[in-house]
Image (cartoon, rainbow, N blue to C red):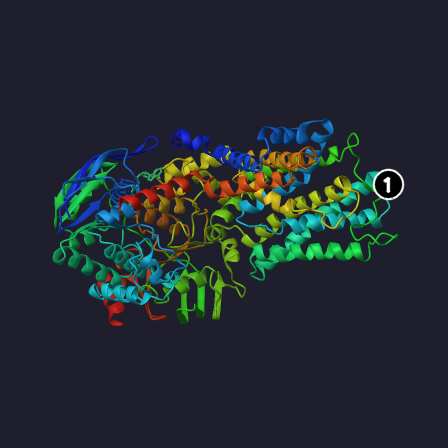
Amino acid sequence: MQVHLNTIHKQFGSLVANDEISIQFEPGRIYGLLGENGAGKSTLMKILSGYQQPDRGEIALNGVVQHFATPRQALAAGVGMLYQEPLDVPVFTVLENFLLGRADDGQRPQQSAKALAQLAGRYGFQVDPHEHTRELSMGERQQLELLRLLAGGAEVLILDEPTTGISAEQKDLLFASMRTLAREEGKTLILVSHKLDEVQELCDYAYVLRKGRLVGGKQLPCPNQELVDLMFDELAPRPARQTAPGDVLLDLQHVSARTPRLELEPVSLHVQAGQVLGLAGLEGSGQELLLRACAGLLPLSGGSLRLAGEPQPDWDYPRARQHGVAYLAAGRLEEGLIAGLTLTEHMALVSNAHGLLVDWLQNRQLAAQHISTYQVVGQPESYIENLSGGNQQRFLFAMLPQNLKLILMEHPTRGLDIRSTDWIWEQLDRRRADGTAIIFLSADLDEIAARSDQIAVFSGGRLLRSVPAAETTADELGHLIGGAL
Amino acid sequence: MSQPKPRLERIWPLLPGLAALLVTTLLLLAMGTSPIDAYSAMWQGAFGTSARVYSVLAFLVPLLLAASGLLLTFKAGLWNIGIEGQIIMGAVAASWVALRVQLPAGLQIPLELLAAMAGGALWAALAGILKTRGGVHEIFGGLALNNLAILFTNYLIAGPWQPPEGGSFRGTQPFGAHALLPLFENSRLSLLSLALAVVAFAGVALVLTNSHWGLRLKALGQNARSAFLLGVSSNREMLLAMAVCGALAGLGGGVRVLSWFDSLRQSISGGIGYLALMVVLLAGFRLVLTPLVAFFFSAVLNGSITLQLRTQLHSALGDILTGVLVLLVLLFGNYERVRRAFRRRRSQADG
Ligand SMILES: Nc1ncnc2c1ncn2[C@@H]1O[C@H](COP(=O)(O)OP(=O)(O)OP(=O)(O)O)[C@@H](O)[C@H]1O
Ligand SMILES: [Mg+2]
C-alpha cells in the first residue's frame, strides 16, 4: 500500500512537533525513520496510525485521502502501529489480547487460538494463547501485538523503536519477519530507530527528521556518517575512558534468587568502586534477577551480600537507597516515572526536602536547571508522559541523587539517540571517576563491550563466565551467548 | 503548554446537573405534581427560615469532614468505602467519653472530639493494615468493618449502654448537658464543629496542593510502583492517609452524637459516609467543587424532608434527585471518556 503524507503539521502548545512534513512510502519496501530524541518521529507515526490527529495536512493511502479519528479506523484502512510503549493489557491472556479491539467475527475461542497459532507459525513466533501477558517478555509482547495488527488487516506496519529492550535472538526473528512481510507479502514497513547499524542492515531507504522537519532521505546502505550528519549539527568525539578501580564495593557470595519463571543459580561476583560491570545474556537469562537482587527488590534465596565490607543480612530496597544505591528499571513509565505528574512535581517528590510544605518555586527552578543541563526537551510544567521517549530517559537520569555509591541500570540508553547515549555515558563516567560503581544490563552487546570494565555473561539462570572487557569483543560475546544455547 | 479547551468541554460538568433536574422534573410531572411547587417547597425546606439554614449547615459538617478525608485517600488511589464505619466508630468513641467521663466542660468536649478522631482513625487503620499486611482490598475490608461497626453499636445500645429505664433499643440515654456541644440559637448546629470542618477542609486542601505528603500521596495514587522506586514508602503513606481520613470521619461521627443528636443512636451515621463518597465522586475529586457539592447535597436532602410535609410527595425525592445526579455524572461526567466513546461508536458506524 502506498502512503502519502502531505504537509502534516502538529503543534503542542508552542512546540512544533511536526512542521509541514511531506513524505512518501512505497509498498514492498522497508523504510527507516531517523532523528534525534524529540525530533518528532513518534508524533508523525502516531498521526499516520490514527492515534493523534494532525493540526493540518492529509494522509493518502493508494491515492485516497483518509481521515483517522482512532487507531481502529486506521487499522481498518490498513495502517497498524507498534507503539514505543506497549499497549496490551497485562492481566489478559495472550488470546484475549489478540482478540482485543477486533470486531466479533463469531469465531469460537478454539478457532481463534488456532488462527493465532497459524499466523504466529508463519513468522516463526512462538506464542502460548493461554499465557497471561504480564508473564511475557518485552519481545514476546511485541510479537503478539504484531500478530494482532496483521490479523486486523494491516498493510502498512509501523514499528516505533521495536528493538529496544528485546533480546538479540528476538531481534533477528523480528527482522526476518519484517523482510518476509515486505519482500514476499508486499507490505509497507516503517522502522523508527536510533540504531544506525540496524537501519542499514534492514532498510531500503531512510528518512531523517530534525526538530520537527524532514531534512532529507538516503538510499541505503550508505556510510553511517552521512546519516549522522543529517541528524545532528555536530557530534563530539567520544573521549577515551580511564579506569582506576578502588576498593571492593559490592561483594556477592553464592547469591541466588528466584522468580516463578526463573531461578538464578548461585553467583559470586564483586564490583570495585569506580568500576563498570556489564551483564550480558539473552533476555531472561538471570541477569535481571541479579540486578534486582542487588537493588533489594528481590530477596536473596541464598548467599550473602556485602556493601563496602559491611554484611547486609536484611537487604531491601529502602535500605539500598539509604546506602546510596540507585536503581533504574527498563520500563520508564511503569517503573521510575509517574504519568500524571509534571517534571517539577517529580523534582519535588525526590528532593527529600525537610519541612512540611513544598517550595514550588525552588523545585520549578531545579527542574528548569535539570532540563537545561540534561538537555531535556520539555518545560517544568510538562507532564512526564508527554515527553518523547528519549527525553523521559534523560529526565530519569536527571533525577538521580548526587554522590551515589552504586548505580544499577537496566537498558540505560534504551531509546536514546547516539548523541544522548554518548552524553549519558559521559555523565556516568564522571560519577565513576568519583568512585561510583555501576552495574548495568543491556541487550546491546556493543554497548556492553564498549562501556564495561568487567563483563559477566549469563545463560539459563547461570553465570557462564566473567571476563575483563579488554579481553573480549561484542562478537565474541555474541558467540558466547549464542553458543550456550 | 495548555491548549484552549473547547466550549463544550468547559460547560460539561454542569450538564449532568441539568439532566438530573430534567429527569426529576419528568418524574414529578408523571406523578401529577407541579414541579414548580415541589422545587419551591424544597427550596423553602432548605433555606426558608434561618432555622432551616442552620439545619442544612449542621448536616453539612460531618459530610464535609468525611469528604475532606476521602480526598486524601482517593488521591492515594484508595477506595475507602470503610468511611461509614469510621464515622460510626468515631461516634462510639465520643459517646464512651460522654457517658463514662466527668470533666469540666473545657476539657470534656475536647477529650470527646479527640476520642472520636482516635476511634475513626483506628477503624481506618485496621482497614489499612488488612490491605498492607493481609492483602485484603480496602473495599472488602471496609465493607466488613462497616458491618462490624453497626453490629457493635447495636450491641452497645442493647447491652452495656442501655438506658436505665430499659425498653427502648433505639439509643442510649441522652448525654449530660456538659458533654454536648453548645448549639447555635436552638438549632442542631454547633458553630465549633462548623469551624472545625472548615479548618479540616482547608488543611486537606493545603496538604494536597502544597505539601510533600500530598505529593507523595498523588504519586502513590498515580503509579504505586514508580512511587516506591522513587523512595515513597507506600505502606506507611497508605496507612497514614487512611488514618487521617478516618480521624476526620470519626470527628464527623462525634459531631453527630454531640450536636445533631444527643446520644448514640442505632443509625448514627445514616449513610453519611456513602454520601461523602458520592460527593467526592461527583466533584470529580476536585478540591474547590467538593464543599460546594457537599453543601448542595445537604440542602437537597434537608429540603426534601420539609417537602414531604408540604406536598404529598415522599421525601425520597431528594434521594432520587441526588441518585440520578450521581449516576449521570459517573456515566457521562468525564468529558474525555464520553468523547472517546462517541468517536468509537462513530468509527464503528463508518467501518
Ligand atoms: N502529547 C504531547 N504533549 C506535549 N508535547 C508532546 C506530546 N507528544 C509529544 N510532544 C513533544 O513533541 C516532540 C516530539 O516528540 P516525539 O515523541 O514525536 O519525538 P521522537 O522523535 O519520537 O523522540 P524519541 O526518539 O525520544 O522517541 C517532543 O519534544 C515531545 O516532548
Ligand atoms: Mg519516539
Q: Image quadrant of residue A478? A: bottom left
Q: Quadrant of the C terminus of chain A?
A: bottom left
Quick one: B345 or B252, which is closer to the camera? B345
Residue A458 in the image: above or below residue A66 = below
The residue wearing badge 1 is B104
Note whether residue A134 is visible.
yes
Horizontal and vertical percent position of residue A257: 44, 69
Quick one: A165 or B121, which is closer to the camera? B121
Left or right position of A2 against B192 = left
Left or right position of A234 against A275 = left
Q: Residue furthest right?
A: B165
Amino acid type assigned to the residue bearing label 1 in the image: Pro
In the structure shown, which secondary structural element does the residue marked by tag 1 occupy? Answer: loop
Horizontal and vertical percent position of residue A317: 50, 58
Horizontal and vertical percent position of residue A224: 16, 48
Subunit of mark 1?
Answer: B
Few, some or many C-alpha atoms within 10 Å of disc 1 (few <14, some 14-19, many ≥20)?
few
Residue B55 in the image: above or below residue B327 = above
Note whether residue A472 is visible.
no
| Residue at figure coordinates x 43%, y 61% from the top left | A292
